[in-house]
Amino acid sequence: MALVNEHFLKLPNNYLFSDIAKKVNAFRVSHPKKDIIRLGIGDVTQPLPQASIEAMHKAVDELANKNTFRGYGPEQGYDFLIDAILKNDYASRGVHLEPSEIFVSDGAKSDTGNIGDILRHDNSIGVTDPIYPVYIDSNVMCGRAGVLEDGKWSNVIYLPCLSENNFIPSIPNRRIDILYLCYPNNPTGTVISKAELKKWVNYALENDTLILYDAAYEAYIQDPEIPHSIYEIKGAKKVAIEFRSFSKTAGFTGVRCGYTIVPKELTAATLTGERIPLNRLWNRRQCTKFNGTSYITQRGAEAIYSPEGKEQTKATINYYMTNAKIMKEGLESTGLKVFGGENAPYLWVKTPRGISSWKFFEQMLYEAHVVGTPGVGFGPSGEGYIRLTAFGERNDCEEAMKRIRKWIL
Ligand SMILES: *Cc1c(COP(=O)(O)O)cnc(C)c1O
């Protein structure tokens, strides 16, 4: 008899996006003539940079020829991409990494979800709240999160991020074994300063905590004082793994490519206290369970570091960030409190008069015909907020703001 991994049965069904779809459909049926603007989407909408498209076409042609054909590549990624990452994403910011500290993958969701493979099941975990759901759900699946009680997992420490603390979680007064941080943040669109991040690195050094740092949105940072990588903080290589993705940076959500940094000096303990380098374990994990990102994809990713590629990705990011600016100004002009949207493609809007996330979602749908994402769907501290994304079309953003102004004012 095959037995299932019963930890999976503890996961509540995630109805967030299907509940949204149901409510939008119900509105559409009763109001067939109204056109609806969707600002809830968490996916990019603009096409790939031309440089990547050309590089991928060329790579396909190479695979079509016996002399330039390539089969399995290195599990860790091709040197051409690793070198481009080292030089452009790290050396340029004064961070020096070795090629063997970089693992190219099919995206940050897989890596943030799979990293738990190399860590014991009984580590305690800490998350900022609200949160990207992958961090918690992947821990539930291996039993690390404990049991769900009143909407919270028993072995998860929640660090509330609210307007009251400027969305900067306060350092807990107890130890955490593994801590997830995501900056710029999804869903709140807020960022962390070097000084605040330094506090977390010092906390980790003092408490022997492993930080899992998701920097999927670093390319959206506009303020030159905001850190792009946790390794800009002294000592971070001893305590942190960093995840990056080409999804939001260069429209690779459908192409699939990201990478993870596991520094050589980063270790974790065995029960007897022996220190084990995590780089070695992650390398072993990847070589066993992953066979590399496709050659075509990696050539496409490499091309975003060419002069044309850099310009093209910057132009697309500017397009989204101009949307964010238009949206932020439009919403603020109605008196709403808006967070994020300056260094990230997300706006985190406080609902007025303490209305619940879902109530405000419905009012905005019925009165302005604009769809957002209820903040409570990202965790208990998301209640009383709604997330809007800047990944839409310019016209839609402008029209949505007109409608929201008309509704609220
Ligand atoms: C979109 C996103 C990612 C990227 O995931 P991919 O699997 O690389 O597409 C990672 N982390 C967060 C928080 C995200 O929102």
Image (cartoon, rainbow, N blue to C red):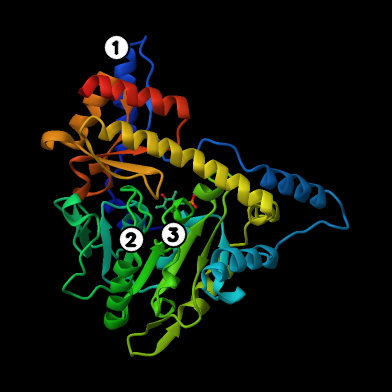
Q: Quadrant of the C terminus?
A: top left
180 vs 300: above or below = below
User: Circles 2 and 1: CB distance less than 8 Å?
Assistant: no
Q: Quadrant of the N terminus?
A: bottom left
Callout 2 crowding tier (Cα within 10 Å): few <14, some 14–19, many ≥20: many
Farthest-out residue, left: 353
Percent of width and height locating residue 44: 49, 39
Please give the name of the residue rendered at 40% of the width and 29% of the height, measured from the top-left corner.
Answer: 397
Most foreground residue, 253 or 350: 350
* Discs 2/3, front: 3
Q: Amino acid at mark 3?
A: Pro
Farthest-out residue, right: 67
Q: Earlier in the sequence, mark 2 or mark 1?
A: 1
SS class of the residue under badge 1? helix
Q: Which mark is residue 30?
A: 1
Callout 1 crowding tier (Cα within 10 Å): few <14, some 14–19, many ≥20: few
Q: Amino acid at mark 1?
A: Ser
Q: Quadrant of residue 102?
A: bottom right
Q: Quadrant of residue 160?
A: bottom left
Q: Where does label 3 land, which residue?
A: 224
> Disc 2 to disc 1, how far (Cα)?
44 Å
Callout 3 crowding tier (Cα within 10 Å): few <14, some 14–19, many ≥20: few
Q: Amino acid at mark 2?
A: Ile
Q: Quadrant of residue 354?
A: top left
> Disc 3 to disc 1, how far (Cα)?
48 Å
